[in-house]
Amino acid sequence: IAGITQAPTSQILAAGRRMTLRCTQDMRHNAMYWYRQDLGLGLRLIHYSNTAGTTGKGEVPDGYSVSRANTDDFPLTLASAVPSQTSVYFCASSDRVHNEQFFGPGTRLTVL
Amino acid sequence: GQSLEQPSEVTAVEGAIVQINCTYQTSGFYGLSWYQQHDGGAPTFLSYNALDGLEETGRFSSFLSRSDSYGYLLLQELQMKDSASYFCAVPYNQGGKLIFGQGTELSVKP
């Protein structure tokens, strides 16, 4: 089934631990994005990638890193998690500039 | 900088019409999108306006006025399943990255 998958669905993490959130799409979209969603703050862009091999910083990149080794995968890494990174994380992809973005089901992350 | 403003909550009754407004401030304009999100699930795309005027898709319509930096989402014949959060969004630049408004929570009552 075409779409975006994210793993894990949810995770509780101790502060200071390293964590990688996985995102895979099978739609062959060039562009991929990571957002975080906090109550009352809507969706905020963390990092993005316009094509495999390139990445860029979004609105709130600090404390996060990404890589884009191929078209399908776009993992998000928290090198040393802090409680303020408790949030719901959504991965998205799109095939053309300005066109619709397709979102994954999200990962609910709690950092204690 | 870029920012969007939309009401935090709207309540309407089943069968009615509701309008969700969005005003934006951007350094350049590359279109206005609307997304729907149910109960914290995956946001889904509803519409995109690049030019002034009304775009209609079934019960949902979206309007844009670039001169007023304003748009709205119009939902007709409201159904209970329309209860959700609605987000307007604009691209940062021509690269497709989006900045979202804080969302409007629509509650549809019987």
Image (cartoon, helix red, strand yellow):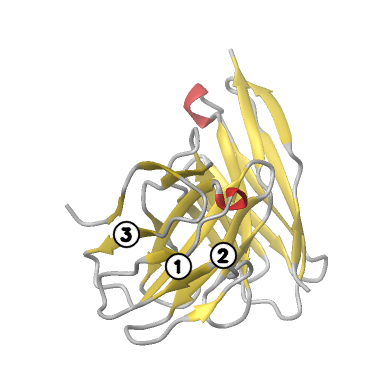
- Label 1 sits on a secondary structure element that is strand
Give percent across and percent down for residue A28.
24, 72
Cβ atoms under marks 3 and 1 closer than 8 Å? no
Task: Tell me if mark 1 has few (under 14), some (14-19) or many (20+) residues whose alpha carbon lies within 10 angstroms of its own.
Answer: many
Residue B73's disc is none
Q: Quadrant of residue B91?
A: bottom right
CB within 8 Å, label 1 to label 2: yes
Where residue A68 sits in the image (x, y, percent)? Answer: 33, 78
Residue at image mark 2:
A45
Q: Circle 1 marks a residue in which chain? A: A
- To which chain does the residue with label 3 belong? A
Label 2, label 3: how far apart the Cα atoms are: 16 Å
- Residue extending furthest bottom? A53
Where in the figure is residue B31, as x and y percent of width and height?
Answer: 61, 70
Q: Nearer the viewer, residue B60 or A101?
A: A101
Q: Amino acid at mark 2?
A: Leu
What subunit carries mark 2? A
Left or right of B6 on screen, residue B62: left
- Which amino acid type corresponds to the residue marked 1 in the rendered image? Tyr
* Marks 1 and 2, how far apart at CA: 7 Å
Residue for point 44% across, 55% down: A17
Vertical arrangement, residue B74 with respect to residue A69, above or below: above
Q: Residue furthest left?
A: A1
**Disc number placed over residue A22 in the picture, else none:** 3
Q: Residue at x 58, y 12 (%)?
A: B110
Total numbered badges shown on the rendered structure: 3
Residue A33 — which label? 1
